[in-house]
Image (spheres, rainbow, N blue to C red):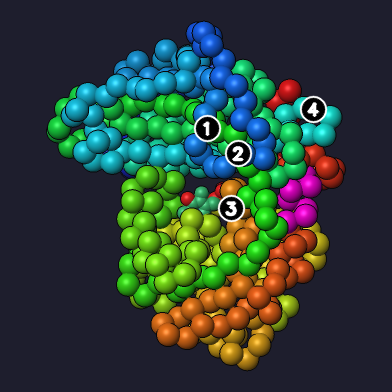
Amino acid sequence: MAEYFYSKNKQKGAEQPLFHRVMAKSMKIAFEKAENLKPLVPEEKLGFGKVFTDHMFVMDYEEGKGWHNARIIPFGYISLHPASTVLHYGAEIFEGLKAYRRADGGVQLFRPMENIRRMNRSAERMSLPEIDEELGMQILTEFVKTEQRWVPKSFGTSLYLRPFMFGNDESLGVHAVHRATFMLIASPSGSYYAEGINPVKIMIEKEDVRTVRGGTGYAKCGGNYAASTRAGERAAKKGYSQVLWLDGVERKYIEEVGAMNVMFKIGDEIVTPMLTGSILPGITRMSCIEVLKSKGYKVSERLLSVDELLGALKDGSLKEAWGCGTAAVVSPIGKLAFGEEEYEVGGGKIGEVTQELYDTLTGMQWGKTEDTFGWITRVC
Ligand SMILES: *Cc1c(COP(=O)(O)O)cnc(C)c1O
């Protein structure tokens, strides 16, 4: 087992590293089989995130000792010390990806290394320990193999994987964590578009902001969600399914839509907000950009002001708008509201580019079309 030391404090001139980490590239994962396996839920009855598989993965971290005690154990409650860091200071990060069933019965993941790398960037931001990339892949693949009977078969359904990590010091002192827990749970989920792809109504949010530059916007952390729920609830009351976030400093530039990245087709240009630090770098976003460029579209990652967007709505040059993320793949936007005004986008229907992206990405993910990008990792 190869081990090496990794200094967290990369700042020049720092006298002492904050603490050292031991990063194992692979580990023996202990397995305690659940006594009674649960009955599978019929595929047409699957929702999202309510049903969980038979097992869960858990691994502990301690300063000086590194990650240890990797285990797959029966799914169940966990117990925490009431002073546990996560309960007071919100030291929590997570990821979301899916295991897809191929027509030939195999199971595969879509760009899983990108999730592992992003989780490490989130960890770095939140002063949580990182996980070696190879170990991350080992955990994902061994766990999915163990739970493979839970990967549903119909197109659009998947086994949603939720890796997460939290600080777990048993002390109220405010400092970088010395103890952490990493877990992976899985939930079979139904097709996001069981009722067909219907464009959604979105409201531009003028009051709340999700994050600011220099903050935690680029990290996938629970706190970002806690802070954005209120705006989502207010929008829902008015009949909108998501909010369109503006930047937290000038409240002028478009950032994201709900918990998805956002893209617009303005004339012949596909525009998506550039990653300024307050935007979550979505893997679907990155994949959409690469697919679009490979098909010859002009794609710009740049600042897009709300004024420019409203201008494009009024003069008819805004042809399509969609959100993109792992859950929905793409979600077409049919209506956009700003203050009292409501505008229709693309005739309220899914646009050509949106549809093309949906077909290309889902084709690869469910193994229906050839993976020409090298994005698929077969698990079994
Ligand atoms: C996870 C997430 C996304 C989408 O990322 P994907 O990797 O494409 O699933 C976008 N915005 C926020 C805030 C997110 O948490």
Between residues 77 and 144, which one lies in front from this camera angle?
A: 77
Question: Residue 72, percent across and down?
Answer: 50, 15
> Mark 1, residues whose alpha carbon is within 10 Å: few (<14), some, or many (≥20)?
some
Say what secondary structure mark 2 lies in: loop
Dot 4 and dot 2 residues touching (CB under 8 Å): no
On whether ligand 1 comes within 8 Å of the CB at mark 4, the answer is no
Amino acid type for the residue under numbered disc 4: Gly
Amino acid type for the residue under numbered disc 1: Val
Which mark is first along the chain, 1 or 3? 1
Say what secondary structure mark 3 lies in: strand
Per the model, the C-alpha gap separating discs 3 and 1 is 21 Å
Q: Which mark is residue 325?
A: 3
Answer whether residue 256 is magenta in the image.
no
Question: Residue 281, percent across and down?
Answer: 52, 53
Q: Which mark is residue 105?
A: 4
Q: Which mark is residue 51?
A: 1
Which mark is first along the chain, 2 or 4? 2
On whether ligand 1 comes within 8 Å of the CB at mark 3, the answer is yes
Determine which quarter of the picture holds residue 227.
Answer: bottom left
